Amino acid sequence: MIKLAIVIPYYKIDFFEKTLKSISKQSDKRFTLYIGNDASPNNPLEIIEKYFSEGQYNYYDYKENYGGQNLAKQWERILENVTEDWFQILGDDDMIAENFVEEFYNCIEDVEDKKLNLIRFPAKYINDDKQIKKVSLQYDSVAKVKDLFEDKVFFRNQVTLSENVFRNQAFRKIGFTHYPLAWYSDLKIVLDITGFNDYYFNNRSFVTIYNGEHNISNGSFKKKIKFEASQIFLVEIINGFNDKISYVVYNRFLDLLFMEARKEKYSLNFKIILSFLRKFKIKLGIKSFVKYIKLK
């Protein structure tokens, strides 16, 4: 029985062949491949047919571009077709190790017995020269989301979409949060689908993530929109997970926003300060308010 769907929201052709090649080399072929063409100017069928025969993949040639509006809408459109119990959304410039699917099946019985909704794999981040820029941290096989979130906020680790495998049934009850540019939408679904509790970490395989100049995560790309999305995200996690996250972590996130606002002369959303005053200790809320006033 096939339990895993590998879903590729396709738009950029630059690294797409490497992505498909990594999937075709899987030691375990028990997966269903879904590819959604988000109205790309480059037809990918020739590359797809180089690695997969008809019947080995599901291809959707969409005429309207969703990724330019919001990447989460692009992801969701393809996921409507997925019937497998679990799915991975793999970027069209990312790759999986040859034993990725094999390791999914090696741990899935344990994951389902523990009633977990998320499996994460380590990631290697490469630049345009194919050099490894960073390798993600290792965690226990049953790991805590609060540790992952703290590592993300303190820049010790990254969280992207491709290294996650989600339980489909749990995802359909939640869906993605549509932040501008889908900035933080990947992290938010990790928090939501786990309820900020445990997930399974499989360190016996890995995902290779492209993190170069043409990537949306590049620091110079649409910085102001990302800043706005970050503020919305912070308000939502304060209101939704404040009992799960320490004041230190929240304050670190807020300090990063203050530094960005000061540096770029952006306006800060006053809802953040109100959320701190309402949810946290008055002392912390007042400190945040003083920082906010200094920005004005």
Image (cartoon, grey):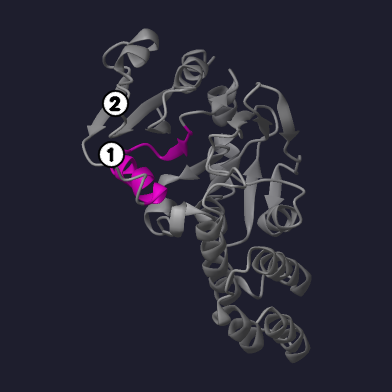
| Residue 135, image x, y percentages | 74, 34
Above or below 217: residue 250: below
Tell which of 75 and 243 is nearer to you. 75
Mark 2 residue type: Asn
Residue 199 is covered by the magenta coloring: no
Residue 192 in view here: no
Question: In terms of secondary structure, where does tag 1 sit?
Answer: loop
Report the quarter where the C terminus lies: bottom right
**Label 2 Cα neighbours within 10 Å, binned few <14 / some 14-19 / many ≥20:** some
Say which quarter of the image contains residue 40: top left
Marks 2/1 in contact by CB < 8 Å: the verdict is yes
Q: In this view, does 23 lie to the left or right of 44?
A: right
| Residue 75, image x, y percentages | 38, 44
Q: How far apart are marks 2 and 1 (CA)?
A: 9 Å
| Residue 56, image x, y percentages | 32, 17
Residue 167 in view here: yes
Residue at position x 68%, y 81% in the image: 292
Q: In this view, does 55 lie to the left or right of 237?
A: left
Mark 1 residue type: Asn
Instruction: Tally the numbered discs.
Output: 2
Above or below 204: residue 195: below
Q: Which residues, given as a range, are shown in magenta?
A: 70-91
Residue at position x 66%, y 67% in the image: 257
Residue 58 - label: 2
Residue 185 - label: none
Residue at position x 37%, y 26% in the image: 33
Residue at position x 46%, y 37% in the image: 89
Residue 81 - label: 1
